[in-house]
Image (cartoon, grey):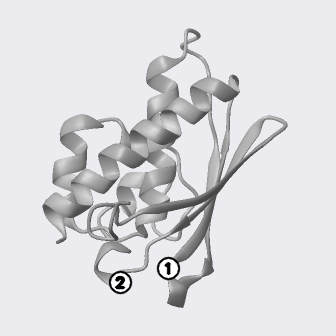
Amino acid sequence: MASAVEKPIRICTITVRTGRLVCDVEIPDERFRRTTPHLMAFVRQEYPDVARHACVNGEGAMFGAVMEHTSTPHLLEHLIISEQTKAALDATCTFVGTTEWTNEDAGEARIEISFRDDLEALRAFNEATRFLNNAVLTCLA
């Protein structure tokens, strides 16, 4: 069984609904709940597109406005979208998502992501989570 240090972002549930995945995640350790400039420099090496994602936030129209000081689940949302976009056969595909803390004090959040293919969305979710767990341990531990 993996320890919290090996997997700082824990997947609690993934529910496939019509056209969207609903993912409940848990980040028990407070050190891993927020992004930093150092983490985002690491992430941009693998996902250079995330700064240009459209994003509803209080600071700008793109994820780049908040990416260095947002919640880690919010970053995971954008990594999942990036993974799906890379895999899409149709270059005009658009994916949308939302992230909210369901219990911020406990590090529990819900991420909802649209998809065109449920298996591709699950693959994207797994790959993005694997990458982000490694990135968080590399940059924030």
Measure how far apart labels 2 and 1 are at the Cα level.
Answer: 7 Å
Hey, which residue is sitting farthest top in the picture? 89
Mark 1: few/some/many CA within 10 Å (<14, 14-19, 20+): many
Q: Label 1's element? A: loop
Q: Say how many tags the image has.
A: 2
Q: Quadrant of residue 135?
A: bottom left
In this orientation, which residue lies closer to the viewer: 133 or 93? 133
Where does the image place residue 132, in percent across and percent down from the top left? 33, 52
Counting other residues with Cα less than 10 Å from the Cα at mark 2, is it few (<14), some (14-19), or many (20 or more)? few
| 74 vs 130: above or below | below
Q: Residue at x 44, y 73 (%)?
A: 27
- Dot 2 or dot 1, earlier in sequence: 2
Mark 2 vs 1: CB contact within 8 A? yes
Residue 97 in sight in this render: yes
Residue denoted by label 2: 30
The numbered mark at residue 33 is none
Residue at left offset 52%, top offset 90%: 105
Residue 38 in view, yes or no: no
Image quadrant assignment for residue 82: top left
In the picture, the quarter occupied by the C terminus is bottom left
**At 31% from the left edge and 44% from the top edge, which residue is drawn?**
131
Residue holding disc 1: 107
Q: Is residue 117 above or below residue 126?
A: above
Amino acid on which the number 2 mark rests in the picture: Glu
- State the residue in front, 15 or 67: 15
SS for tag 2?
Answer: helix
Residue type pointed to by label 1: Gly
